[in-house]
Image: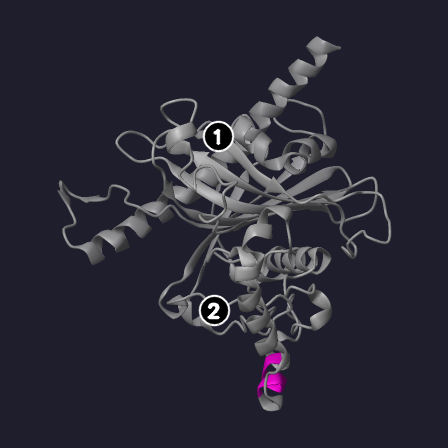
Amino acid sequence: MAALGNLVRLAPLSLDTLPFHPSFQASVERERSKSESRLSRAETTAPLETAQVANECEGSPNPPATSSNFDINGRPNLGAFVRAVLDEAMTFVDHILPTTFKASSEKHSRPAVAKVQVLKHEISGHELSRIPWLECRIPRDKPPKIDHTGEAWFARRSRHISQQAEGTATFREFNFGLRESHSEREGEYTPEIFDTYKVLAWTISDEPSEETPDFGDYTHVTMSIFEMCHKLPFPLTTRVFPVLVITAITGLIPPHDFIVVQVPVDIQSLPEAFYSSGRNLREGDNAVKRKKPILGVYTSIERCVLRRDHIEWTMATSSDAKGWLPMYVGSERIGNDTANRESNRWAQKMGVPGAIVKDVGFFMDWIVRERKKTSSHG
C-alpha cells in the first residue's frame, strides 16, 4: 500500500517549511537556523536509520530529502516543494483513497444530475506517528502530540457528462470554476463563505526560462495563501481557515486532468495576514469581518479527470473547525471538558458528509448563473 506523506496533513505547515517569498524577508534570519537544523538532521541520519527510512519511503510520494531540494537559506526550492505536495496528493487520491476508504452512501445534490458517492476513512495517530516527518523529500518537524490525534477523512466522487446542459458542465467549465482562481470562485458558489482573503501569492510564469522552477509534469502551476472565512449560525463564532493553495494541470494540453490542493498553514506571525494576525479587528469593512474569529484547519484534494465524454470529480478532505460546536444528549449538554471535546469532534464529523455533497449542487447552480452572465454579455 502507498505510504502516507508528511505535507498534505491536518497539522498546519509553518512558514519556515515553505519556499521563499519576499514577504518572509523580515523573518528569514530568525527562521534560517531552524531550516538549517532540519536539513542537517535529514542529511546526517545514521546509516542504519537511513536504510530504515528509505524502506519506509519506498513507493512513497516523498522519498528522502536531498540538499538539491533547498536554497542557500535552507528553504525548499519552489519546484521541489510543489512537486512534493502534488505527488503526495495524487498518490492519496489515486492509491490510498481507492484502497482504504469505505463507501457510506450515495446521494443527490440538486440541481446536479449525477449522484454523489460519499466515502470515509480514519487515519489513526499511530499511523501518523510512523510517517518519517524529517526524512521525506521536504522535511518538517513532527507535530506535537501527533501520536494521540488522528485525521477523519471524508471524500466524494461524482461522474458528470461533459456537456453544457442543465445539471452538468463541460470540462472547460469545471476547469474555469474549480482550478482557475479556485479560492475566489469557491467563495462565489459557497453560501456560508463571507470572505476569501488573499494573503500572498508566489509569482510563477508559464513561459519557460532558465529561472523557471522545475515542476516536472505539472503545468500552469499556481501557489498562494488564502484565509477562507465561514459564517456559522448564531451564536457560533465565525471560522477562518488559513490555507496554502496549489493548483496545476496534470495532463496534456489542452487540459484533461487538473488538481487543487489546500493545506493548512500557520500565518499568525505574518503581517500580510488579515484575520490570523488580528488586523481585521481594526480594519474590517463590516461588522462580520471585524469579529474575532476562531482559526480552524482543513486540508483538501480536488481532482477532475476527463475520460471520453464524462468527467470524474473526486474530492477528499479532513478538517477541524476548533472551538466549540453544540452537541446535546437528550436535553442535557455533556458536562466535562473531555466529553465536550469528543462530542465536538463527533458533531463535526456528522456534518461533513452532508456539506461536501451540497457543494456539488452549489457548483452546478453557480455554473448556470455564469452561463447566463456570458450570454447576456454576448
- Rate crowding at label 2 as few (under 14), some (14 to 19) or many (20 or more) other CA atoms within 10 Å: some
Q: Is residue 99 above or below residue 106?
A: below
Q: Is residue 52 magenta?
A: yes
Q: Secondary structure at mark 2?
A: loop
Give the residue drawn at x 63%, y 60%.
Answer: 88
In the image, residue 373 above or below residue 33:
above
Q: What residue range appears in magenta?
A: 49-53
Residue 179 within the magenta-colored segment of the rendering = no
Position in image of residue 285 (x %, y %): 43, 23
| Foreground of the two, 101 or 332 | 332
Name above or below for residue 131 compared with residue 48.
above
Predominant SS of the magenta segment: helix
Please tell me whether residue 328 is drawn above or below residue 286 in the rendered image.
below
Quarter of the image for residue 81 reads bottom right
Q: Which residue is mark 1?
A: 195
Residue bearing mark 2: 142
